[in-house]
Amino acid sequence: MVAVCLVAASVSVDALAATKTHTVTMEGTRFIPETLTVRRGDRVVWINKDPFPHTATGPARSFDSRSVAPEASWRYVAKKAGTFPYVCTFHPTMKGTLVVE
């Protein structure tokens, strides 16, 4: 019984170690990088470096940061595979794409 628990704990630690954190900067009324490719389970952090708020809003609000204030950030864990174009609802010309493998 103890061996089974140790193996399960080992798998969980390995799965956590495989996840990564990626950063998207909101600056100059752009998302940098404009396209980001991640794996399912990875975390994406959007950081606002502009002097005004932004959002990162996916299709049909599949993800939505709401308003991210200047010098603030928002985190999202990519759960579903696919290609997700997103926009800043305050600045519709500000577009990005999140690709989840």
Image (cartoon, rainbow, N blue to C red):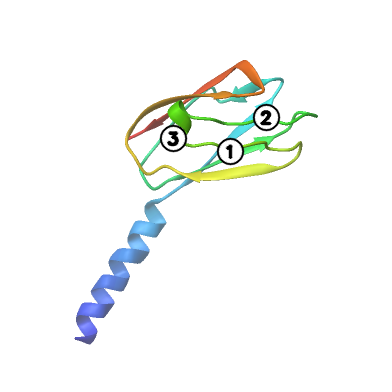
In the rendered image, which quarter is residue 48 located in? top right
Furthest residue toward top: 93
Mark linked to residue 65: 1
Query: Does residue 61 sit above or below 74 in this rendering?
Result: above
In the rendered image, which quarter is residue 34 located in? top right
The numbered mark, 2 or 3, whose residue comes first in the sequence reads: 2
Q: Answer yes or no: do the residues labelled 2 and 1 have beta carbons within 8 Å?
A: yes
Circle 3: is it few (<14), some (14-19), or many (20+) Cα within 10 Å? few
Determine the secondary structure under disc 1: loop
Residue depicted at x 44% and y 26% = 59
Furthest residue toward front: 60
Circle 2: is it few (<14), some (14-19), or many (20+) Cα within 10 Å? many
Q: Disc 3 marks which residue?
A: 62
Q: Amino acid at mark 3?
A: Ser
Q: Amino acid at mark 1?
A: Ser
Circle 1: is it few (<14), some (14-19), or many (20+) Cα within 10 Å? some
| The N terminus lies in quadrant | bottom left
Determine the secondary structure under disc 2: loop
The number of numbered discs placed on residues in the rendered structure image is 3
Query: Does residue 72 sit above or below 3 in this rendering?
Result: above
Q: CA distance from mark 3 to mark 1?
A: 10 Å
Residue depicted at x 57% and y 31% = 56
Mark linked to residue 54: 2
Q: Answer yes or no: do the residues labelled 3 and 1 have beta carbons within 8 Å?
A: no
**x and y percentages locating residue 69 in the rendered image:** 74, 38
